Amino acid sequence: MKIAVDAMGGDHAPREIVRGAAEAAREFDQEIILAGEQGQIIAELGELTDPRITIVHAPEAIAMGEHPAVAVRRKKNSSIVRAVQLVKEGTAGAVVSAGSTGAAMAAALLGLGRIRGIDRPAIAGILPSRRGGTVLLDVGANVDCKPQHLLQFAIMGSLYAEKILGIPEPRIGLLNIGEEETKGNELTLATHPLLKRSGLNFVGNVEGRDIFQGPVDVVVCDGFVGNIVLKAGEGMAMALMHMVKEEVTKSWLAKMGTAMTIPALKDFRRRLDYAEYGGAPLLGVNGVVIICHGSSTARAIKNAVRRARESLENRLVEAIHSNIKAGDGGEAGCADA
Amino acid sequence: MKIAVDAMGGDHAPREIVRGAAEAAREFDQEIILAGEQGQIIAELGELTDPRITIVHAPEAIAMGEHPAVAVRRKKNSSIVRAVQLVKEGTAGAVVSAGSTGAAMAAALLGLGRIRGIDRPAIAGILPSRRGGTVLLDVGANVDCKPQHLLQFAIMGSLYAEKILGIPEPRIGLLNIGEEETKGNELTLATHPLLKRSGLNFVGNVEGRDIFQGPVDVVVCDGFVGNIVLKAGEGMAMALMHMVKEEVTKSWLAKMGTAMTIPALKDFRRRLDYAEYGGAPLLGVNGVVIICHGSSTARAIKNAVRRARESLENRLVEAIHSNIKAGDGGEAGCADA
């Protein structure tokens, strides 16, 4: 399956996007369609020109400040709308974009629609933990959620952990302020019983510290909380790096110490930045959509293309489709809250 | 003013509590009343016996699993209820407790009541940031909040930063998923205009990463989000320490490096643990109440007593009282949401 890449989205577009796409084409022997301003793409490709890369001319751009849904409806020839269109018409199997997250979501929702039984697609971040990685969702697609939305996030997160990260029977936790069933806000108190009878491997409530400790594989929360946790983690890693640097400017020995630990902190921070780390899947739309950070480099784009490939190979969308419909969880389970 | 210390609350009670109280009495020349089982306290005091320390016999204990409000109502002779009682009757000016947070809150609410104009008292955490510290509130007293509650948190947080941390005109931020006024969930969208016309030095929305970066002095959020951010930060510091240790077990040079940076990480983690770091004030009740972590050591208790002293000296409760009542913010401002 071809993969469509939004060549104009991102702080370093089209240069880094085009380079990342070219690297992915070569490294994975992957057919790629670059959607964007043809002249600029050709110029950037230069010596990287590859028979596996084709271009779809989409000269319009959506700026970060524009209202996503309005911009997506108006600018039919924007790179993200055209990239999504390629998936809709079956020319490509997946979209990768480092442009405005809102625009990518709006384009995907309008162009591909939701999987039947999913009320709210969610963005899944993969956060570093002591045991490898924890899938946290939603990290920003939905600010005000209902219990059935969190149940759907749990089903999608479980399938993602199983199909893409290769974890059998992923353990699911509900992000909360205490482990007891009686703890929580209105949303988590109402969600807990839904998860309990969902048929998922639900282990109960988990607390903030568990995200990075790894007692569960998937942590479910609303997009407001998820987004704040993700960004707080990023900010903390930055503050720590600063502190460690200040701490150890005193002796040559200390400097050697910094040289050892700063890379570990930098790596941690980069892994927190879900998009740098292979992009974040938008789960629940009728197609594979990988959202990358605005500051994505060629390497990030290449990793996102790999993530898109894996999602296609492991038939993630189909798995969500059949798991949401099947069984007494599924549509009935989602509707009964 | 005497300070009442709950001698029986905490994982290391009464030993560490009694020792911390004795250290505080000596170091700050502070009169302290220890509330708890007299025999045990006398045994722990031993050579630390000090004329500045008196004991109020309160033999009942409230366990972590008990329902706070029920336990507080039933156990009139529990150490936390008696400690609060001492403040109510004017014998002491402040309470310090490392027992169940829920029980301390319930005892304070029932015994001291709320400051007129405050609907929901809040727990304020002081988180480490690149610029020193950021006051984050609420970090767990209130899970489901209304806009006027967040406005009240902002007023109390601002006064705390000014009176106790010595920051003139503290900058206030609303924790959100984007800086734009139009971003947020129902709660933050409704809170933003209230803060804007509050007369506080409100700088607008801040994101998760700003908590540790320090562009503002006070960050306001509901207790569900605050608690999760706090614990996520703690878990992340622990995971980072683990990673750094693993990273650098390869050479003697690397081991020296770890020796340099692990203390910095440990310090960061301890500072995240709001209670270790001088305790967390419960703001909005009619008296000074400092809540400590269950695992508090003598040093933590001593620091909490210092924090209680500062709150008394700087007349924090009186300042909240007059600022909530005064001006068109105050009660009117709180009621109009």
Image: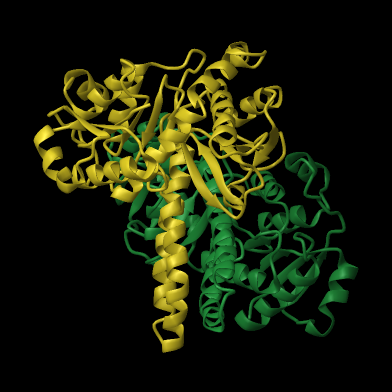
Chain colours: A green, B yellow
Q: Which residue sits at x=66%, y=28%? A: B192
Closer to the camera in the image, A328 or B72: B72
- Residue projecting furthest to the right: A39
Q: As displayed, is residue B113 above or below residue A155?
A: above
Q: Position of residue A30 (x, y in %)?
A: 64, 76
- Residue projecting furthest to the left: B39
User: Is residue A164 visible in the rendered structure shown here?
Assistant: no
Q: Which residue sits at x=62%, y=39%? A: B167
Q: Which residue sits at x=34%, y=58%? A: A170
- Residue projecting furthest to the front: B51
Q: As displayed, is residue A61 above or below residue A252?
A: above
| The C terminus of chain A - image quarter | top left
| The N terminus of chain A - image quarter | bottom right
Task: Say left or right for A98 vs B120.
Answer: right
Q: Position of residue B285 (x, y in %)?
A: 42, 21
Q: Position of residue A23 (x, y in %)?
A: 68, 79
